[in-house]
Image: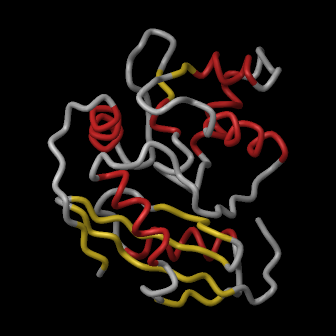
Amino acid sequence: MMKSDNTIIYWTRLTHDNWNVYLAATKEGLCYVGSQDKPLEELADWVNARFPGSELVRDDAKMQVYSEELAEYFQGNRDRFEMPMDYKGTAFQSAVWNALCHIPYGETYTYTDIANQIGKPAAVRAVGAAIGANPLLITVPCHRVIGKSGALTGYRGGLEMKTWLLQLERGRVPVKETAEYV
């Protein structure tokens, strides 16, 4: 749990095609990308656990830069994110999340690959736990991690969302050119 300093967490909801995700940011950058079609309570619960006493404020204009980059990704027009991100975790979690950001677009790694990449080959289960704690779905691409057998494994957004993201990155999903920020 993080200490609160009366942080303001700004949020918006990005709607693209059939997808609805909540986004949140601190003044430092994007701090949360929600699961597909989950209610605002998912975001509120996360904020209350990580930033107790903070204020959750809807600000579509302030969140526009984040919404635009994610919409470009959903449209198949972006393969990496340039937006500032504000993810905070333990040193181990941060190492795992940084490793996730180095998985190339359209490729998959295993949990073992990530454990080896961070120099902790025996920490495969801990890698899985750190990936499960990733607050930034899509932008910190935990959807690119699969089981050693090649099978899709758990994902906070659900396996349907994970499958769709992987198909998008492999050019197998028809994309629409419109997104809506509501």
Residue drawn 60% across and 49% down? 134
Q: How many marks?
A: 0
Q: Residue 129: x, y in percent? A: 64, 37
Q: How is the image coloured?
A: secondary structure
Q: Is residue 171 left or right of residue 60?
A: left
Q: Residue 180: x, y in percent? A: 25, 74
Front residue of 177/59: it is 177
- Please, is residue 2 above or below residue 36 in the view? below
* Quadrant, the N terminus: bottom right
Residue drawn 64% across and 63% down? 84
* Quadrant, the C terminus: bottom left
Q: Residue 149: x, y in percent? A: 44, 9
Residue drawn 46% across and 49% down? 138
Q: Is residue 2 left or right of residue 57?
A: right
Q: Is residue 59 left or right of residue 169?
A: right
- Please, is residue 4 above or below residue 111 in the view? below
Residue drawn 58% across and 56% down? 82
Front residue of 68/89: it is 68
Q: Quadrant of residue 10?
A: bottom right
Q: Residue 26: x, y in percent? A: 65, 77
Q: Quadrant of residue 150?
A: top left
